[in-house]
Amino acid sequence: LATGALAAVLLGTGVGRDLTGSALKLGGAAAVAGLAYTAYQNYQSGKTPPDPNGADEPEMLPPPSGSEFELDAAPQGADEFAATLVKAMIAAARADGHIDDDERSRIADKLSMAGLEDDAQAFIRAELAKPVDMDTLVGAAHSEAQRVELYTASRLAIEPKSRAERGYLDMLAGRLGLEDGLIDHIEATIAKATAATA
Protein backbone atom coordinates (compact mmCIF):
# COMPACT_ATOMS: atom_id res chain seq x y z
CA LEU A 1 0.00 0.00 0.00
CA ALA A 2 2.57 2.57 1.10
CA THR A 3 5.03 2.01 -1.75
CA GLY A 4 2.22 2.04 -4.32
CA ALA A 5 0.79 5.22 -2.83
CA LEU A 6 4.27 6.75 -2.87
CA ALA A 7 4.62 6.12 -6.60
CA ALA A 8 1.13 7.54 -7.22
CA VAL A 9 1.76 10.71 -5.24
CA LEU A 10 5.24 11.09 -6.75
CA LEU A 11 3.87 10.96 -10.30
CA GLY A 12 0.71 12.90 -9.48
CA THR A 13 2.13 16.02 -7.87
CA GLY A 14 4.64 18.72 -8.55
CA VAL A 15 8.03 17.92 -9.97
CA GLY A 16 7.66 14.15 -9.69
CA ARG A 17 5.58 13.88 -12.85
CA ASP A 18 8.40 15.54 -14.81
CA LEU A 19 11.00 12.91 -13.90
CA THR A 20 12.67 11.53 -16.99
CA GLY A 21 15.31 9.09 -18.11
CA SER A 22 17.05 6.88 -15.59
CA ALA A 23 15.33 8.53 -12.59
CA LEU A 24 11.89 7.58 -13.89
CA LYS A 25 12.97 4.04 -14.77
CA LEU A 26 13.75 3.41 -11.10
CA GLY A 27 10.11 3.79 -10.08
CA GLY A 28 8.55 5.52 -7.06
CA ALA A 29 10.43 4.77 -3.86
CA ALA A 30 13.61 3.88 -5.73
CA ALA A 31 13.51 7.18 -7.63
CA VAL A 32 13.39 9.11 -4.36
CA ALA A 33 16.21 6.99 -2.92
CA GLY A 34 18.25 7.17 -6.13
CA LEU A 35 18.03 10.96 -6.38
CA ALA A 36 18.80 11.37 -2.67
CA TYR A 37 21.73 8.93 -2.84
CA THR A 38 23.20 10.55 -5.96
CA ALA A 39 22.99 14.06 -4.45
CA TYR A 40 24.42 12.88 -1.13
CA GLN A 41 27.34 11.01 -2.71
CA ASN A 42 28.24 13.94 -4.95
CA TYR A 43 28.08 16.32 -2.00
CA GLN A 44 30.23 14.03 0.16
CA SER A 45 32.75 13.75 -2.68
CA GLY A 46 33.08 17.53 -2.90
CA LYS A 47 31.74 17.70 -6.44
CA THR A 48 30.08 20.79 -7.86
CA PRO A 49 26.26 20.48 -8.15
CA PRO A 50 25.31 19.42 -11.70
CA ASP A 51 24.26 22.04 -14.24
CA PRO A 52 20.58 21.41 -15.11
CA ASN A 53 21.21 22.87 -18.57
CA GLY A 54 24.27 20.73 -19.26
CA ALA A 55 24.16 18.20 -22.10
CA ASP A 56 25.06 15.17 -20.01
CA GLU A 57 22.39 13.31 -18.06
CA PRO A 58 23.92 11.58 -15.05
CA GLU A 59 22.90 7.97 -14.68
CA MET A 60 20.57 7.72 -11.71
CA LEU A 61 21.33 4.48 -9.92
CA PRO A 62 19.47 2.87 -7.06
CA PRO A 63 21.41 2.86 -3.78
CA PRO A 64 23.81 -0.08 -3.49
CA SER A 65 22.68 -3.13 -1.58
CA GLY A 66 23.01 -2.60 2.16
CA SER A 67 23.05 1.20 1.84
CA GLU A 68 21.09 3.23 4.40
CA PHE A 69 19.30 4.78 1.41
CA GLU A 70 17.78 1.43 0.46
CA LEU A 71 14.10 1.26 1.48
CA ASP A 72 14.44 -2.32 2.70
CA ALA A 73 17.18 -1.20 5.10
CA ALA A 74 14.85 1.19 6.95
CA PRO A 75 15.04 0.29 10.68
CA GLN A 76 11.36 1.15 11.15
CA GLY A 77 10.39 -1.09 8.22
CA ALA A 78 10.10 -0.36 4.49
CA ASP A 79 6.34 0.19 4.52
CA GLU A 80 6.44 2.55 7.48
CA PHE A 81 9.18 4.71 5.97
CA ALA A 82 7.48 4.69 2.55
CA ALA A 83 4.33 5.92 4.31
CA THR A 84 6.41 8.67 5.94
CA LEU A 85 7.66 9.75 2.51
CA VAL A 86 4.05 9.89 1.24
CA LYS A 87 3.10 12.04 4.24
CA ALA A 88 6.08 14.32 3.58
CA MET A 89 5.08 14.80 -0.06
CA ILE A 90 1.46 15.55 0.83
CA ALA A 91 2.59 18.03 3.50
CA ALA A 92 4.83 19.79 0.96
CA ALA A 93 2.08 19.87 -1.65
CA ARG A 94 -0.11 21.59 0.93
CA ALA A 95 2.55 24.18 1.78
CA ASP A 96 0.74 26.84 -0.24
CA GLY A 97 -2.43 26.13 1.69
CA HIS A 98 -4.15 23.54 -0.48
CA ILE A 99 -3.94 20.74 -3.02
CA ASP A 100 -6.05 21.73 -6.01
CA ASP A 101 -8.55 19.57 -7.87
CA ASP A 102 -6.11 18.91 -10.72
CA GLU A 103 -3.52 17.52 -8.28
CA ARG A 104 -6.14 15.37 -6.54
CA SER A 105 -7.32 14.08 -9.93
CA ARG A 106 -3.79 13.21 -11.07
CA ILE A 107 -3.10 11.36 -7.82
CA ALA A 108 -6.39 9.45 -8.12
CA ASP A 109 -5.57 8.50 -11.73
CA LYS A 110 -2.15 7.19 -10.72
CA LEU A 111 -3.67 5.22 -7.84
CA SER A 112 -6.17 3.63 -10.22
CA MET A 113 -3.43 2.73 -12.72
CA ALA A 114 -1.46 1.10 -9.91
CA GLY A 115 -4.50 -0.98 -8.93
CA LEU A 116 -4.48 0.50 -5.42
CA GLU A 117 -7.70 2.44 -5.66
CA ASP A 118 -9.56 1.75 -2.41
CA ASP A 119 -7.00 1.32 0.36
CA ALA A 120 -4.50 3.78 -1.04
CA GLN A 121 -7.12 6.43 -1.74
CA ALA A 122 -8.45 6.05 1.80
CA PHE A 123 -4.91 6.42 3.15
CA ILE A 124 -4.24 9.54 1.07
CA ARG A 125 -7.65 11.08 1.86
CA ALA A 126 -6.88 10.63 5.55
CA GLU A 127 -3.49 12.33 5.12
CA LEU A 128 -5.04 15.19 3.17
CA ALA A 129 -7.47 15.79 6.00
CA LYS A 130 -4.81 15.95 8.73
CA PRO A 131 -2.99 19.14 9.70
CA VAL A 132 0.68 19.25 8.67
CA ASP A 133 2.81 17.99 11.57
CA MET A 134 6.44 18.76 10.83
CA ASP A 135 7.59 17.54 14.27
CA THR A 136 6.29 14.04 13.52
CA LEU A 137 7.75 14.03 9.99
CA VAL A 138 11.19 15.11 11.16
CA GLY A 139 11.09 12.66 14.08
CA ALA A 140 10.28 9.78 11.71
CA ALA A 141 13.68 10.03 9.99
CA HIS A 142 16.05 7.70 11.89
CA SER A 143 19.29 8.43 10.04
CA GLU A 144 20.99 11.07 7.94
CA ALA A 145 20.13 9.08 4.81
CA GLN A 146 16.44 9.14 5.74
CA ARG A 147 16.61 12.89 6.44
CA VAL A 148 18.03 13.41 2.95
CA GLU A 149 15.30 11.20 1.45
CA LEU A 150 12.59 13.05 3.37
CA TYR A 151 13.72 16.39 1.98
CA THR A 152 14.13 14.93 -1.52
CA ALA A 153 10.59 13.49 -1.49
CA SER A 154 9.20 16.80 -0.25
CA ARG A 155 11.04 18.72 -2.96
CA LEU A 156 9.76 16.32 -5.63
CA ALA A 157 6.18 17.13 -4.61
CA ILE A 158 6.45 20.83 -5.45
CA GLU A 159 8.17 23.39 -7.61
CA PRO A 160 8.63 26.10 -4.95
CA LYS A 161 7.36 29.14 -6.81
CA SER A 162 5.54 30.77 -3.93
CA ARG A 163 7.07 32.23 -0.78
CA ALA A 164 5.05 29.74 1.29
CA GLU A 165 6.45 26.75 -0.61
CA ARG A 166 10.06 27.97 -0.49
CA GLY A 167 9.64 28.85 3.18
CA TYR A 168 8.29 25.38 3.94
CA LEU A 169 11.24 23.65 2.27
CA ASP A 170 13.75 25.95 3.97
CA MET A 171 12.15 25.28 7.34
CA LEU A 172 12.13 21.53 6.67
CA ALA A 173 15.81 21.57 5.69
CA GLY A 174 16.66 23.46 8.87
CA ARG A 175 14.64 21.13 11.07
CA LEU A 176 16.28 18.10 9.43
CA GLY A 177 19.72 19.62 10.02
CA LEU A 178 20.76 19.44 6.37
CA GLU A 179 23.61 21.72 5.29
CA ASP A 180 23.09 24.33 2.58
CA GLY A 181 25.63 22.67 0.29
CA LEU A 182 23.76 19.36 0.48
CA ILE A 183 20.45 21.11 -0.25
CA ASP A 184 22.11 22.71 -3.30
CA HIS A 185 23.08 19.25 -4.54
CA ILE A 186 19.56 17.87 -4.00
CA GLU A 187 18.01 20.84 -5.81
CA ALA A 188 20.47 20.56 -8.73
CA THR A 189 20.10 16.77 -9.00
CA ILE A 190 16.29 17.04 -9.17
CA ALA A 191 16.53 19.91 -11.66
CA LYS A 192 18.84 17.81 -13.82
CA ALA A 193 16.50 14.81 -13.67
CA THR A 194 13.53 16.92 -14.78
CA ALA A 195 15.32 19.24 -17.24
CA ALA A 196 14.40 17.23 -20.31
CA THR A 197 10.71 18.10 -19.90
CA ALA A 198 11.26 21.77 -19.10
Image (cartoon, rainbow, N blue to C red):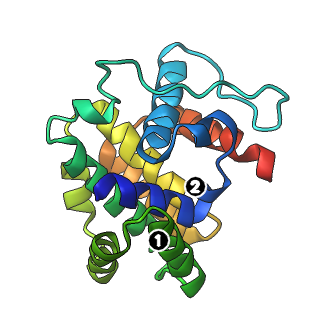
Identify the image quadrant of residue 5: bottom left
Which secondary structure lies at badge 1? helix
Q: Report if the CB atoms under discs 2 and 1 are less than 8 Å apart.
A: no
Residue 192 horizontal/vertical position (percent) = 70, 38
Residue 27 horizontal/vertical position (percent) = 50, 43
In the displayed structure, does residue 181 sit left or right of residue 49? left
Residue 30 horizontal/vertical position (percent) = 44, 38
Q: Residue at x 53, y 67 (%)?
A: 165
Toward the top, the furthest residue is: 45
Query: Which of the numbered marks, if any, corresponds to residue 16?
Result: 2
Q: Residue at x 55, y 20 (%)?
A: 42
User: What amino acid type is highlighted by mark number 2?
Assistant: Gly
Quadrant position of the N terminus in the picture: bottom left
Toward the left, the furthest residue is: 76
Identify the image quadrant of residue 100: bottom right
In the displayed structure, does residue 118 sit left or right of residue 156? left
Q: CA distance from mark 2 to mark 1?
A: 17 Å
Toward the front, the furthest residue is: 115
Which secondary structure lies at badge 2? helix
User: What amino acid type is highlighted by mark number 1?
Assistant: Ser
Q: Residue at x 53, y 53 (%)?
A: 156
User: Which of label 2 and label 1 is nearer to you?
Assistant: 1
Res 159 seen here: no
Res 16 seen here: yes
Q: Which residue is label 1 attached to?
A: 112
Q: Mark 1 Cα within 10 Å, few/some/many (few <14, many 20+)? A: some
Residue 76 horizontal/vertical position (percent) = 14, 42
